[in-house]
């Protein structure tokens, strides 16, 4: 940590945050928010949280920005000023923010200094993870071993939460029947009927490399930053790139809605299934060491490593399917026709 | 000066949280409120990540840690950043894209019904 870099990036982050809130155009707000996310991920790399930065780069700066743009395209990009109660809402908002800020400032005086190795958060549980991960699981990336092994239960339900979010988006937006299409005015097109050969060619060439990289990120998550969540989001992003540069039909012809929801199910089931497999083999839920009984040529330690790989693959499949499902529904207003 | 360097980051996170809370309360546009929520989330994530940072520590990946013959390698907790907050925040970021999707879906559904995203116009139509 170098506090000079830290401070300069932090001040850029604050400028971006203010700009996103101030700007009167939702499309600009989305783009500035993407820049904000990229600066955040720079900051996290600098603080040593490489896995978090990787996730933010793919999720926050990539997919979130696209989701905001899709929402702005489907609704309106103009932000109108409030017609009445303008002053009172500003006063209430400002008052609440200032009160919260003052309370937090008062509490902040007792916090341990930035980068203090003796801070309470770093003293009790995490030294065990740091010193035992190699001996227990043969996985050098502690974030992966904590994510998939020591706190595997937690991650399983996080995956279930993402799956539920995808179901909720489909339940809210999806309209199957023709009669349901109400008389909405056509959205103001950002680029209607605009087909660029260069963009199409380049994105088409890019997709296989993105997917290969995503598979590498999933498979190599034990030794380098990455893992199921990041790999899954990149896989989903490769499909979104196709959907943006062509249209939704191309993606749906390769990954139909049914396949997509099935894959989301399968991903969560792989995770839970490995857990139940451990139960069946006579150990605790998600205790991968017992998998050495059925995996050839592995001892208890390597079995934990392989078990982690298995659940990472499940996470990647589920996250990919859900990211695609959310984008498909948001960008076409639930009609799954042409999209952006 | 020492106190300033070790605490300035908390002040900035508090500032970011205030920006997020203000946007959630005072902004008229629903998508702006969602952006405010995302800023609030990232401020909290930033706070957790900064708790995990340690002076003179490296990223939480053990160097040369391949295979079995590395059991003798001395691993000291003070040399590596705290991995636990990283894990919690990593999943929080991925869940945040799920909640963002749901929030935007609700915004789209509201726009479908009321043909506006502005809070006061929706209120007028409700009355």
Image (cartoon, coloured by chain):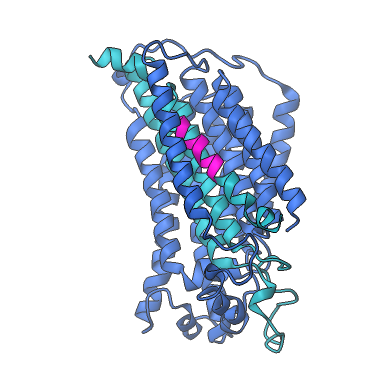
Quadrant for the C terminus of chain A, please.
top right
Q: Nearer the viewer, residue A266 or B67?
A: B67
Q: Nearer the viewer, residue B26 or A314?
A: B26
Q: Is residue B127 left or right of residue A181?
A: left
Q: Give the residue at x 35% y 79%.
A: A280
Q: Is residue B4 left or right of residue A24?
A: right
The magenta span reads B14-23
Q: Give the residue at x 58% y 42%.
A: A60
| Residue at the farthest bottom position | B72
Q: Which shade of the palette goes to chain B?
A: cyan
Q: Is residue A235 visible?
A: no
| Residue at the farthest left position | B127
| Residue at the farthest front position | B1
Chain depicted in blue: A
- Residue A225 vs A127, above or below: the answer is above
Quarter of the image where one finds residue A24: top right
Quarter of the image where one finds residue A135: bottom right
Prevalent SS, magenta region: helix
Q: Nearer the viewer, residue B115 or A221?
A: B115
Task: Give coordinates of residue A276: x percent, y percent.
Answer: 36, 72
Quarter of the image where one finds residue A201: top right
- Residue A132 vs B11, above or below: the answer is below
Task: Give coordinates of residue A62: x percent, y percent.
Answer: 61, 39
Q: Give the residue at x 44% y 78%.
A: A287
Q: Is residue A129 visible?
A: yes
Q: Is residue B61 left or right of residue A190?
A: right
Quadrant for the N terminus of chain A, please.
bottom right
Q: Is residue A151 magenta?
A: no
């Amino acid at each position: 940590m170098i506090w000079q870099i830290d401070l300069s990036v932090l001040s850029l982050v604050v400028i971006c945050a203010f700009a996103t809130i101030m700007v009167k155009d939702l499309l600009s707000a989305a783009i500035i928010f993407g820049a904000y996310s990229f600066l955040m991920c720079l900051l996290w790399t600098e603080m040593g949280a490489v896995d978090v930065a990787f996730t933010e780069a793919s999720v926050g700066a990539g997919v979130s920005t696209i989701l905001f743009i899709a929402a702005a395209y489907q609704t309106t990009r103009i932000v109108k000023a409030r017609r009445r109660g303008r002053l009172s809402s500003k006063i209430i908002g400002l008052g609440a923010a200032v009160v919260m800020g003052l309370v937090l400032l008062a509490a902040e005086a007792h916090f341990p200094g930035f980068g203090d190795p003796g801070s309470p958060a770093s003293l009790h549980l995490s030294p065990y993870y740091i010193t035992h991960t190699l001996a227990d699981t043969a996985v050098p990336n502690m974030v992966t071993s904590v994510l998939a092994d020591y706190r595997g239960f937690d991650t399983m339900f996080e995956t279930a939460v993402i799956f539920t979010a995808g179901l909720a988006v489909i339940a809210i937006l999806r309209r199957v029947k023709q009669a349901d299409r109400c008389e909405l005015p056509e959205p103001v097109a950002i680029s209607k009927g605009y087909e660029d050969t260069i963009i199409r060619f380049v994105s088409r060439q890019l997709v296989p490399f993105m997917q290969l990289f995503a598979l590498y990120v999933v498979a190599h998550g034990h030794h380098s930053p990455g893992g199921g969540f990041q790999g899954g989001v990149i896989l989903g992003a490769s499909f979104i790139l196709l959907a943006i540069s062509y249209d939704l039909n191309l993606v749906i012809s390769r990954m139909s809605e049914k396949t997509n929801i099935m894959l989301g199910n399968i991903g969560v089931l792989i995770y839970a299934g490995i857990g139940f497999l451990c139960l069946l083999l006579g150990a605790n839920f998600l205790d991968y060491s017992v998998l050495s009984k059925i995996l050839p040529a592995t001892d208890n330690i390597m079995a934990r490593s392989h078990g982690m790989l298995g659940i990472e693959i499940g996470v990647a499949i589920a996250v990919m399917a859900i990211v695609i499902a959310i984008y498909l529904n948001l960008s076409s207003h639930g009609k799954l026709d042409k999209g952006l | 000066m020492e106190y300033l360097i070790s605490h300035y980051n908390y002040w900035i996170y508090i500032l970011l949280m205030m920006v997020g809370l203000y946007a959630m309360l005072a902004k008229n546009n629903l998508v702006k409120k969602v952006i405010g929520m995302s800023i609030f989330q990232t401020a909290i994530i930033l706070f957790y990540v900064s708790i995990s940072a340690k002076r003179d520590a490296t990223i939480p990946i053990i160097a040369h840690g391949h295979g079995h013959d590395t059991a003798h390698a001395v691993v000291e907790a003070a040399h590596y950043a705290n991995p636990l907050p990283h894990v919690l925040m990593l999943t929080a970021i991925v869940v945040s894209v799920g909640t963002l999707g749901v929030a935007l879906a609700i915004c789209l559904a509201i726009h479908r019904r009321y043909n506006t995203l502005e809070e006061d116009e929706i209120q007028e139509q409700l009355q």
